[in-house]
Amino acid sequence: MYPRQKQKVQQHIQQIIDFTNPFPMTSRLATKIYRAYGKDSIKRIQQNPYALSRDVFGIGEQTATEIAQILEDKLGKTFSPDIPTRSTTAKRHYCGPGNGKLSPKNLDNLKQKLQYSPRQALPTTWQLNNPDFWTVPDLKRAVSRWYDVSWAHDSSYRNVFKKCGFTYDRQQRIFVPVSLAN
């Protein structure tokens, strides 16, 4: 980013901080808001600050409510805490229902399903990375379809493999049950 662009971004971030004053807005939080909304940040916050809890990762309902109360006093306007949810694909970017966690029952069910090869467990129409052994992309699609849960990072899927008794074979880039690895 060029110095002039950096300066404009810093000005927008400072405007967000000033607009939400007396809320103790940190520059880090204001940067997250700027990344979510861009130069329309102030306008979007004025429309409904409760939407921050939906659109900005790291802002929960409590923080959004505090900001809304400050802006209600400042602008003399009331905001509705009822905000429409985003489309399913956008919501699932970070995690699915259950805050991205599989219940113990679902985890046991997944362990049983992973005992079969992807060729046996998944639809024949799916193009698999390795039809005989599990890979992260195949598990992503399977968990998303079976449990409506997805995570932003591959490490979460690797942890699920570990919980289900699998180990990683670096040479072949596959996950193998521990019983077959020894």
Image (cartoon, grey):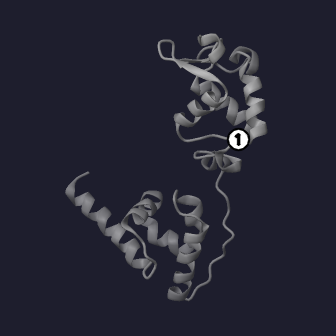
Q: Residues within 10 Å of mark 1 (few under 14, many from 20)?
A: some
Viewer-proximal residue among 161 and 93: 161
| Residue 140 lies in quadrant | top right
Question: What's the residue at 41%, 66% (across, down)?
Answer: 30
Question: What's the residue at 54%, 88% (across, down)?
Answer: 73
Question: What's the residue at 51%, 12% (across, down)?
Answer: 172
Horizontal arrangement in the rendering, residue 161 relative to residue 115 (left or right) = left
Task: Tell which residue pokes out farthest to the left in this image.
Answer: 3
Give residue 20's position: percent from left, percent from top. 45, 77
Question: What's the residue at 36%, 73% (across, down)?
Answer: 15
Which quarter of the rendered picture does the C terminus lie within? top right
Horizontal arrangement in the rendering, residue 63 relative to residue 15 (left or right) = right
Give residue 122's position: percent from left, percent from top. 73, 21
Viewer-proximal residue among 143 and 107: 107
Per the image, the residue denoted by label 1 is 102
Looking at the picture, does residue 19 appear above or below residue 128? Answer: below
Element carrying mark 1: loop
Count how many numbered circles sit on residues in the image: 1
Give residue 74's position: percent from left, percent from top. 50, 87
Horizontal arrangement in the rendering, residue 64 relative to residue 105 (left or right) = left
Looking at the picture, does residue 49 appear above or below residue 71? Answer: above
Q: Amino acid at mark 1?
A: Leu
| Residue 60 lies in quadrant | bottom right
Give residue 88's position: percent from left, percent from top. 67, 48
